[in-house]
Image (cartoon, helix red, strand yellow):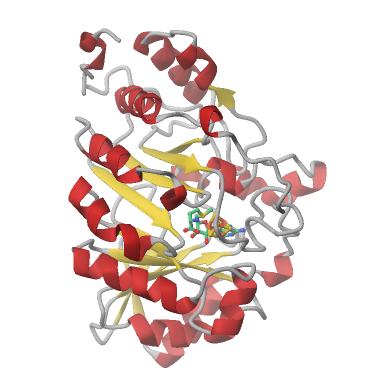
Amino acid sequence: MNSRENIVPLTRIRAPVDALARPIHDLRISVMDRCNFRCPYCMPRETFHEAYRFLKSNERLDFPELLRLARVFVRAGVRKLRITGGEPLLRPNLSDLIGDLTSLPGIEDIALTTNGMLLAKYATELKAAGLTRITVSLDTLDPAVFARMSGGFGGVADVLDGIEHARRAGLAPIKVNTVVQRGVNDHTLLDLLAHFRGTGVIVRFIEYMDVGTRNHWNPALVVPSRELAARIHARWPIAPRERDYRGEVAERHVFEDGLGEIGFISSVSQPFCGDCSRARISSDGSFYTCLFATQGVDLRGPLRAGATDDELFELIRGIWSGRRDRYSELRASMRDSAELHKVEMNYIGG
Ligand SMILES: C[S@@+](CC[C@H](N)C(=O)[O-])C[C@H]1O[C@@H](n2cnc3c(N)ncnc32)[C@H](O)[C@@H]1O
Ligand code: SF4
């Protein structure tokens, strides 16, 4: 590649906005479609079984390809990256990629979402590579409920150990993502909060979503954030805070006694499509403009066929400019009209 192609003009003059005037600000990169858990709400075992055909390693974008795409996305307006999966820590040498991405001009923030199983092993090297903060998924502290929600893999102690290693490595803030399902883990959430209150760890409750087509989504299992907030408020009063920036997914609250912050991600009960500035790349290099998309646009083909950065930029710009996605806002009507072949979350990245 011509090294001059690497020089990214940081002006946003040509940065696209979509058909609903939303810029492209966040890019979520799935670096690995495989996972060491089988959370039923994401990768149910009956689908993602031993014979399931995951991507081969040469089908996944390699690190130079990911880096190059990230650069082009910066030119299109991206300032924030989230590395996700599947389980990103299953990707060999992930810290090398993090190191390269953190030094990319224009990137202001890099986050990583992990189930925490391998975090004790990698926290120090991730921090040394330049990662500053981390999000760890943990749905409950109850071992039996944990086993049910991870598909029988891993354990609470491993994830807590991972969080402790992240803390000792200096990763901050540490956020915990907790998917909430009625009758499954919602009775354990105050215990989870009691554990993290006052530690600086920010717990964010995520409404159970209808991602993909395999998780047998049942709206009756969704606990609306307002209901959950009321339950929490009755135990420890909480007060809302401004979002950090336009398009932030979590609605922030603080404990009134000063013992920290929590968040609510309410894609089902309070859709936030209006501000959505998130793009996604699957592990094999397809570009998706919505978590609930049915189709992506292949970027790996052009990349491997020798497309220039300008050509890739024009491709991305064209796709983003035509974007009209607002699935969460239209959920009710869209679910009726089409049980669409929505792409699975392990592939596209959460
Ligand atoms: C797909 S995972 C990928 C990263 C990593 N394996 C993990 O679990 O943190 C990203 C996030 O999506 C959340 N998630 C997965 N399926 C979901 C669903 N059906 N509804 C809401 N959140 C979901 C997970 O709990 C996790 O916090
Ligand atoms: S939510 Fe994360 S840990 Fe659970 S199956 Fe999906 S990718 Fe794996």
Q: Position of residue 255 (x, y in %)?
A: 31, 81
The reply, left or right, for residue 166 in relation to residue 53 is left
Q: Is residue 15 visible?
A: yes
Question: Who is closer to the viewer here, 317 or 83?
Answer: 83
Q: Considering only vertical position in the picture, is 308 above or below 182?
A: above
The residue lying at 38 percent from left, 45 percent from top is: 82
Q: Considering only vertical position in the picture, is 62 above or below 348?
A: above
Q: Quadrant of residue 6?
A: top left
The reply, left or right, for residue 165 in relation to residue 141 is left
Question: Who is closer to the viewer here, 191 or 170?
Answer: 170
Q: Is residue 240 visible?
A: no
The residue lying at 41 percent from left, 27 percent from top is: 17
Q: Position of residue 176 (x, y in %)?
A: 40, 68
Q: Position of residue 169 (x, y in %)?
A: 20, 64
Q: How many marks?
A: 0
Question: Who is closer to the viewer here, 258 or 93?
Answer: 93
